[in-house]
Amino acid sequence: MIELINLCKTYRLKGTHKIVADHISATFPKGKSIAILGRNGAGKSSLLRMISGSLRQDSGKVIRHGSVSWPVGFGGGFHRELSAAQNIRFIARIYGIDTDNLLGFVEEFAELGKHFRLPIKTYSSGMTSRLSFGVSMGIRFDTYLVDEVTAVGDVKFKAKCNDVFSDRLKDSGALVVSHSRNLVLRICESGAVLENGKLTYFEDINDAISEHEKNMSGDFKD
């Protein structure tokens, strides 16, 4: 379960103010997959980053009951001078999990071959995406945070990503930021709509989509 208590966040740039969280209070139940919907620039990614702890709110609290992931597929935390194997060993120690188990899972999942033990600075963007998704799936979290990315690579590898993510959701919840109706209908049961700094929670994902489409005048992609 994740609780937001009177959460506030405003961006200030060149004399302008953009409010992305205006005294938001909400509770995301344990074990549910919940879509975070809103127009471009509404602050969905910022909200997810505040929940993850990578972005500091101006005021208010985020209370995390259980473990919460970083945004799935995010590879910005890798040390590019180190290899995938070295980065994974470091991550495993931080999260207090078995190093060899995580190393074995990610090496098999990411399918990087000899590059697995070469510096990440030599990787293509696709290779880095495979690695970051693999690490995200290799650690069991109570809640996964997803910002648009749920699968990477070619068709076969995307199917592999979808299969393992679906397996994780059997025992975990997720907060999912996406503009895809098909995606949120496939993996989410509830939804929350962010509009003008206010967050409205809907138990039924279809109600959340209807509210979002009303805000967007029906502009929600399949």
Image: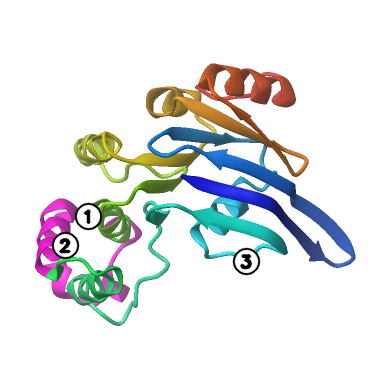
**Is residue 41 visible from the viewing direction of this image?**
no
Q: Position of residue 147 (x, y in %)?
A: 48, 46
Crowding at mark 2 (Cα within 10 Å: few <14, some 14-19, many 20+): many
> Which of the two labelled residues, at mark 3 and mark 2, occupies the earlier sequence position?
3
Specify the label residue 138 is tagged with.
1
153 sits left or right of 103 in the view: right
Q: Secondary structure at mark 2?
A: helix
Q: Nearer the viewer, residue 37 or 168?
A: 168
Q: Dividing the picture into quarters, in which one does residue 154 lie? A: top left
Q: Residues within 10 Å of mark 3 (few under 14, many from 20)?
A: some
Alpha carbon separation for disc pair 3 and 2? 29 Å
Q: Are marks 1 and 3 in contact (CB under 8 Å)?
A: no
Q: Main secondary structure of the magenta part?
A: helix
- Residue holding disc 2: 102
Where's residue 160, x and y in %? 20, 39
The answer to whether residue 8 is magenta is no
Secondary structure under tag 1 reads helix
Q: Earlier in the sequence, mark 1 or mark 3?
A: 3
Circle 3/circle 2 CB separation < 8 Å: no
At x 65%, y 35%, the residue is 38
Q: Which residue has dot 3 on it? A: 56
User: Looking at the picture, does residue 32 appear above or below residue 42?
Assistant: above
Q: How many marks?
A: 3
- The residue drawn where x is 46% and y is 28% is 184
Q: Residue at x 47, y 37 (%)?
A: 29
